[in-house]
Image (cartoon, coloured by chain):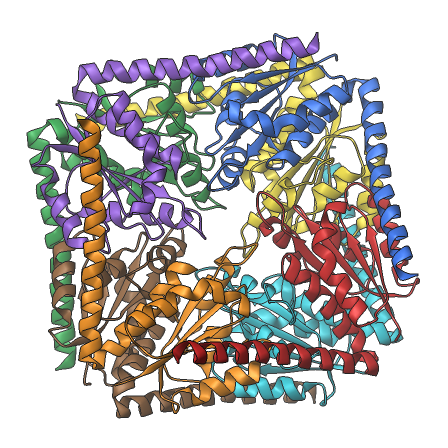
Chain colours: A yellow, B red, C cyan, D orange, E brown, F blue, G purple, H green
């Protein structure tokens, strides 16, 4: 499965918080297309995109939106592709509104919601990759390597801290 | 303006909580049409309904939905008619999810959100009537009479309580 | 219906967040009057204003207030005109208090609540215009044009993003 | 100061939860008057009552209301008498809405808010009595006696539990 | 009743937010004593202070505290004087913790809770004054004057805004 | 890809709420295995299961847990398979704790969180199927048929309601 | 260290929810004393108990309280013994008030807070035992055995479920 | 009991907020080891550490983590040592997620949760010391001295404030 991923943002203002998503896809060499489409300002484009996404070769659709974040749910209503939602924090409710608007989908149309904000940006890409990796040996291996490097980085942080504390106590 | 109102529910399970809406419209003899349409399960019908609502003579659209309540926002994205949202309480988040999913609409597409649940059911109809009454003298007078009767009922409750307390103290 | 709109703020400190409301009304050439009136500090003025608003030609009243935001509810109790409430975020509860104080009106007296803060400021004006447009062909057309321009702006953002990503990948 | 206390409820439905208030005033033989007045359905009566309360010999005003509980704040805006608010829990937000609507009064007009629901019902009366007791030696002594009895009752519960556990362990 | 008021803060860090309290008491020439006493770090001093406050001529005790704000409740448990609580906002829960810790007192020991933070600082003093004014004609008059000035200030803000808008439209 | 799905519950008490998951898998004839494993009471079994799941032919792992719901996160830390989390509502925090414990995964280890409770139970299975369908034409068609039937059912509800209202008005 | 544990409840109404605490202590044969003492209704007894607890041989103090749950914090302010707090859920805020009132202790006086309600009742006892076990080999072994049995019970639930599903599929 | 304490952080980013923990241990000369280990990125290391902590002489384990803070619960699942959790506030939910993820442990595996953030950092160390002090006379005395100094510092703040106010009033 040589799939590509769509990354849709509800507004240009969501772009700065989404860097992590694109970094991950670049690191894994997974083709992704970034789009700005609003469930409320361009609903026909959203519907049209979602209805044709499968036939255009998309395998997973990531949606990032804030406030009453309907984007992921609306996209999911028009496609059977897995849809991943990232609740973007906005003033004044700081993402509680977008989290509940995304995750609490009624029976029948799921949205795979990840963490709010920048952690979610990276995690949405990793979740998409874990899905693509199910039928892509190469990607599966890359994801295992990524995890290993991630562990090693954490172990290194630990090692440095232990050494620093050892020095202090001399 | 002899307008009619659409009352859309996201699911059949929203119907029992919506009695107050229909009672008010009946009391005011305002024509209303009740529909069940799901932003997620029948998105094309919702879009189609909203796009043609104005031409079919609807003046106001009331949307009741629970959980990640996208219905009102989706309807509003396809029409310039005023859209009123009623957040329906569902387990387990009891309407906080539907309130935030409805009221926190991003810039450009407003939803007029009223109280959650049964108070909102009645208030949605009264709000619709206050809008229709702007160009309907008869309806305007009826609404003033309704308010007056409502006050009198509250005054009567007060009178009865005062008398009851007076009796107790003898 | 050549109506005008009242925009009431609970305090001078609400003014800076309300720019979007006045911008929209200016863009649509809808006459609006801005007032500062406090449900708690000038209750008689609020009552008097609300009671006479209809006879003075107001069609819609927008109320912006923070904290225990009673302004919209108090205004609504004295008039049958549609009342739109904007919950203004204040420290420390950041608008959750004003949202609940506005939207959760008891049966009989609705307040049409829109998003908290600056998104609500713009949306309150757009909601008022959608109400006025019901009996004003010209305004109705302007609102459709506004929506169209809004969509085109979103489509342009999308186009620019797509081009930017295309460049990066060369 | 031989004062009397007004106990205002926003709706007849608040009466069942307010038994504790009246029980306390009866126990202390403090004269109180119970009223049903709605900030939204009978705003003129509320304003009139509050404006004349001082001249009618009221010393403290207790207000119980649910949802967007404006009653206490509206009363407080028309009188300099101390106003005590009891947030009544209602479906679906269970008193969080009424608590924030009552306690978060803006600068200048305080409301003395007590616990939500039945604990608040009793505590509102005890708070009113503590205020009246400031210039009523007799009432002050009664309140001290009440506190003492309350402590003794708690001590008795403790004693009984200790004895019960002692028996179990034999 | 020529009473004085105690203003107790749970920590030195609460002092900067409490300026409004002292300003109000100064403006009304009501004698107040400021103290720093912690329910947790100096519990014996708190108990001792509360037990002897009445005999030392205090009429009202104001307590400001953040986080798990036990100060007001602990003071109230040792005195029958009215106790006013100000929930101080602290990171990370921004006053929701202190509000609930203060207002939700169990049956028998009320705390009169006012708004969180700086609005509450001023309102606590105004509430105390409204209590003292019950038996102090002079103070009662001052409070009425204060309210009047407060209204006039709000009316002036309104007038200035109306004029400003009139100018803009020329 | 003829994959199977693991459905892990944190406790036997989660089983009754999970009926919808198994119903969906049965309807789609997707093989699933149900397990009870606790992140806290049988952590070694959880780790062991997660580490070997891929090699045993599992393609997706669904985890349902309540309270501090660590199960999904812990499973995800030991496998690169997509992990879907269902926050189960428990007293007293009714699923807000399990939602936040599941969805707010730190950078690097995503959990695909769906709605809390019974809606999530069904949606978790549908999300898993949408993932499996990416490389299973047959399943993909079944999912499209399911969506169609789901729409038709909603349309039927609408039709019945419209007819019922038509009758009432005769 | 042959220590005993005090289990203090803020009110008789907390007793029914505390069965799990006493069951655990009985199972481990750890001596415990149950008391009812209210931070607000019997503050002197609480202070006296806490000040003398260490000298009476108590090693750990467990406090269960609801609403504005000050009990644990007040006890902790008078003793250096470890204090464990159980937030008891009460209407209407269902334990969010007691959780925040317990856990958010200011710097200097910690309270070891466990889960709200019945899960916390059992966990408070297990936490106390883990503390006592630090210097009691026998208790340490019992706790390990308890954990093992707990795991085995979970494994058994898993086994039964697996078998049940195996049967169904035949 | 000459025990040592482990202080585990879920991520290097938690280190700056943890200064208070190390300060307290230094002040009390209690040996502590600082580690960075992630429940999600290095789960095997966490399991291994927790399983062997007792045998390596650790008496108490402190875990600090943010977001879906599983670290403390995971550690607790592998050891019978007392585990103390510090919920670290992170954007955007500011510690409500980590608090609920830590404190709401299911029956059988307790985590002793302290205040969120920097207050919790210091309090976690003080709680650990109160546990160690149960079998360490010297430490017990130090803790009493610490408490005394802490009280004296608070008393001094009070004294300075009283003097400052006295000056102002001259």
Indicate left or right for G32 with G19 as reference: left
Instruction: Please report the residue visible at 22 percent of the width from the left and 65 percent of the height from the top.
Output: D146
Where is residue B88 drawn, in percent x and y?
A: 66, 52
Splitting the image into 4 quarters, where does residue H107 fall? top left
Splitting the image into 4 quarters, where does residue D135 fall? bottom left
Residue G108 visible? The answer is no
Instruction: Please report the residue visible at 68 percent of the width from the left and 28 percent of the height from the top.
Output: F20
> Which residue is more in the foreground, D43 or E146?
D43
Outermost residue on the front side: it is B170
Instruction: Please report the residue visible at 18 percent of the width from the left and 38 percent of the height from the top.
Output: D163
- Looking at the image, residue D103 lies above or below residue C77: above
Residue B125 visible? The answer is yes
Where is residue D72 drawn, in percent x and y?
A: 46, 74
Splitting the image into 4 quarters, where does residue H100 fall? top left
Where the C terminus of chain D falls, by quadrant?
Answer: top left
Where the N terminus of chain D falls, by quadrant?
Answer: bottom left
Indicate left or right for C50 with G65 as reference: right
Where is residue D10 drawn, in percent x and y?
A: 52, 72
């Amino acid at each position: 499965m040589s799939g590509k991923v769509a990354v849709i943002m509800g507004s240009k203002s969501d772009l700065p918080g989404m860097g992590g998503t694109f970094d991950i896809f670049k690191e894994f060499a997974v083709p992704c297309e970034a789009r700005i489409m609003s469930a409320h300002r361009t609903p026909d484009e959203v519907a049209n995109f979602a209805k044709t996404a499968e036939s255009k070769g998309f395998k997973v659709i990531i949606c990032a939106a804030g406030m009453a974040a309907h984007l992921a749910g609306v996209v999911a209503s028009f496609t059977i592709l897995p849809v991943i939602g990232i609740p973007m924090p906005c003033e004044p409710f700081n993402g509680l509104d977008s989290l509940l608007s995304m995750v609490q989908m009624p029976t029948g149309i799921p949205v795979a919601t990840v963490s709010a904000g920048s952690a979610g940006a990276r995690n949405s890409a990793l979740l998409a990759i874990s899905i693509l990796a199910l039928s892509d040996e190469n990607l599966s291996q890359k994801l295992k390597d990524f995890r290993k490097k991630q562990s090693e980085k954490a172990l290194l942080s630990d090692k440095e801290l232990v050494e620093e504390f050892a020095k202090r106590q001399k």
